Image (tube, rainbow, N blue to C red):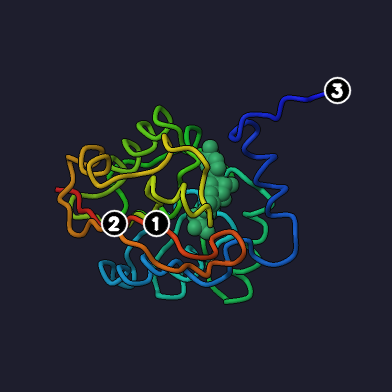
Amino acid sequence: MSTTPPPPFADPAGTWNRRFADDGFLFGSEPNTWLREHAANWSPGDRVLCVADGEGRNSVWLARQGLIVDAFDIAEVGVAKARRLAVEHAVTVNFAIADCDAYLWPEGVYDGVAAIFVQFADPTTRGRLFAHIVRSLKPGGTLVLQGYTPKQLDYRTGGPPLASHLYTESLLREAFADLDIVALREYEAGLAEGSGHCGHSALIGLVARRR
Ligand SMILES: C[S@@+](CC[C@H](N)C(=O)[O-])C[C@H]1O[C@@H](n2cnc3c(N)ncnc32)[C@H](O)[C@@H]1O
């Protein structure tokens, strides 16, 4: 008897909780490199939001740099590990368990938003997510975003197997037309972010500032 597999983004909380259930960190415990390279856009004491923060590698590192960090993710297993990582590093992060549509996005408060590999979002969800991100930034606040491009479908070393979830330069330029682009780069590089993002990858990075 054949069974139809569930669509890849059905039951996101359950799916991600299962992925995060193993010991260790699926994407490692070190911050994403694009984020690390562009975090100097923020200064100690700045308020930053980490969107869909997973097991906390990015939020905890930003808190270690002296930032005031909010973070949310749909997967409570990931958030529990993130809380433990923060305790290990003796830093405070204001964690929440929330779907990106249900998160109580404050408006105009963040000096920064980090959106690192948030490509769970289909085009419709992504439109709402990106609009929330833009509105949550203060004027002058900076978004740092990293994702995969459609070329990643040739490599399959991480990320969703759906072209509609991946980013191109023109997609990001259009989506963030209300922001000033500081850096926007499609590039290829080897990633060694745990077993989840591992190997040669087709990446895109964006840094953009609210006017
Ligand atoms: C590829 S992981 C990236 C995690 C983290 N940003 C990082 O770079 O390590 C994608 C994350 O999106 C979260 N996620 C999936 N669907 C979500 C949703 N609807 N709302 C909020 N978070 C979601 C998952 O739980 C997972 O932690």
Q: Nearer the viewer, residue 202 or 55?
A: 202
The residue indicated by pointer 1 is 202
Marks 1 and 2, how far apart in space? 7 Å
The residue indicated by pointer 2 is 186
Residue in view at x 52 percent, y 72 percent = 30
Q: Looking at numbered disc 3 in the image, what kind of residue is underneath it? A: Met
Tell me, yes or no, if residue 157 can be seen here: yes
Q: Nearer the viewer, residue 183 or 76?
A: 183
Q: Looking at numbered disc 1 in the image, what kind of residue is underneath it? A: Ala
Q: Is residue 80 above or below residue 61?
A: above
The residue indicated by pointer 3 is 1
The spot of residue 109 in percent (x, y) is 31, 49
The spot of residue 182 in percent (x, y) is 17, 58
- Whichever of labels 2 and 3 marks the residue nearer the N terminus, that label is 3
Q: Is residue 138 above or below residue 13?
A: below
**Secondary structure type for disc 2:** strand
- Whichever of labels 1 and 2 marks the residue nearer the N terminus, that label is 2
Residue in view at x 67 percent, y 41 percent = 15
